[in-house]
Image (tube, rainbow, N blue to C red):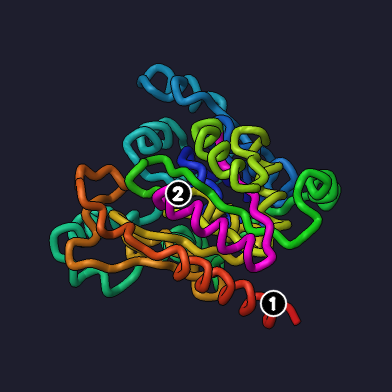
């Protein structure tokens, strides 16, 4: 079977799609991945993906553009749509093969914003992504994101990072409401330095200024300086990762580096928390939480982000120690 796998954005969601790669490959399915530029960069070294098809966002903005892209996607036996929005539904409507999609549980997440007790039962996106595999007769097993990074790339990147043990910190997020406050993150960095860890800041061009502020404290600032696949190699080399509810969490998970994910206006119940064997979450779980699906919030108090730096470091050291015990 030749299959087209679709997940257009965002970076973290695309990384999580890797949780279905191994089940597909073990079932003898040859698959291509359709995504937005530059997210295909994640899978440059991944031998399980037959081909990554990258398209510009503008190419899928209108019906005519969607139809043109569809003309290039005619040679598949089935489509696995793990984006499941209007754009991908229109796109797959032009294809003449069976389409398998996943239940996003968007309505449940929206209900969590209104009826807070619903957040007691957590969703996990890898499990949601794996559900359509059952309809294809494929066993998903224990889905976890996993992306292959060539050892030669890792060795090249090793020359850029500290020789000592280091922790990667991600100062940004797509929506500012999800960012752990920079002043608190600075305190985290100083505590880690006192405990003998170096720190490396990772992120895109939008995080460059925050990276420079951390650089003033002795952090190696790589924000905006690396392509996505090389940032992935940095995370693979890190002892642990600290991030808000952002892509860095899922990139860390995909290279098996323990991660601490800090949740504020969003909530781990939405499906984007690491599993316990991948890391840990920190949330104050206030009565008003969650207040936003994506982190866009006008809340002036931001009490949900009043998380002490000492707690963040303690949690990070705990998951790093646990990961070390599992490896030994």
Pointers 1 and 2 in contact (C-beta within 8 Å): no
- Image location (x, y in percent) of residue 7: 49, 43
Q: Note whether residue 51 is visible.
A: yes
Q: Which mark is residue 82?
A: 2
Q: Which residues are magenta?
A: 180-204
Q: Quadrant of residue 323?
A: bottom right
- Image location (x, y in percent) of residue 178: 37, 49
**Residue in front for this viewpoint, 317 or 291:** 317
Task: Judge left or right: residue 46 versus residue 263.
Answer: right
Tell me, yes or no, whether the highlighted magenta stretch contains residue 264: no
Asked if residue 40 is positioned above or below residue 192 in the image, the reply reads above
Task: Judge left or right: residue 114 versus residue 149.
Answer: left
- The residue that mark 1 highlights is 324
Local crowd size for mark 2, using a 10 Å CA cut-off: few (<14), some (14–19), many (≥20): many
Q: Please report the residue visible at 62 percent of the width from the left and 79 percent of the height from the top.
A: 322
The kind of secondary structure element at disc 2 is loop
**Residue in front for this viewpoint, 201 or 198:** 198
Tell me the quadrant of the picture where the C terminus can be found. bottom right
- Image location (x, y in percent) of residue 209: 52, 33
Q: How many marks?
A: 2
Precedes in sequence: disc 1 or disc 2: 2
The kind of secondary structure element at disc 1 is helix
């Amino acid at each position: 079977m030749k299959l087209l796998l679709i997940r257009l954005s965002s970076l973290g969601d695309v990384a999580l799609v890797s949780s279905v790669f191994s089940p597909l490959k073990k079932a003898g399915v040859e698959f291509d991945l359709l995504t937005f530029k530059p997210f295909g960069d994640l899978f440059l070294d991944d031998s399980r993906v037959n081909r990554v098809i990258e398209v510009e966002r503008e190419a899928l903005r209108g019906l005519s553009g969607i139809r043109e892209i569809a003309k290039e996607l005619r040679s598949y036996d089935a489509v696995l749509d793990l984006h499941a929005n209007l754009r991908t539904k229109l796109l797959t409507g032009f294809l003449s093969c069976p389409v398998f999609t996943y239940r996003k549980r968007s309505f449940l997440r929206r209900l969590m914003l209104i009826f807070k007790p619903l957040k007691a039962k957590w969703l996990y996106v890898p499990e949601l992504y794996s559900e359509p595999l059952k309809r294809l007769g494929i066993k998903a097993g224990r889905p976890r994101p996993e992306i292959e990074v060539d050892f030669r790339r890792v060795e090249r990147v090793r020359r850029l990072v500290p020789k000592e043990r280091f922790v990667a910190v991600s100062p940004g997020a797509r929506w500012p409401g999800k960012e752990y406050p920079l002043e608190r993150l600075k305190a985290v960095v100083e505590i880690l330095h006192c405990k003998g860890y170096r720190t490396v800041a990772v992120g895109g061009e939008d995080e460059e200024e925050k990276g420079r502020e951390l650089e003033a404290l002795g952090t190696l600032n790589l924000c905006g300086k690396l392509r996505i696949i090389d940032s992935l190699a940095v995370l693979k080399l890190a002892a642990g990762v600290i991030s808000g509810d952002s892509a860095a969490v899922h990139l860390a998970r995909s290279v098996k580096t323990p991660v601490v994910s800090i949740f504020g206006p969003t909530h781990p119940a939405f499906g984007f928390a690491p599993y316990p064997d991948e890391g840990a979450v920190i949330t104050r779980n206030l009565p008003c939480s969650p207040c936003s699906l994506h982190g866009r919030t006008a809340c002036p108090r931001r009490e949900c982000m009043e998380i002490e730096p000492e707690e963040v470091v303690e949690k990070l050291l705990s998951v790093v120690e646990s990961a070390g015990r599992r490896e030994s």
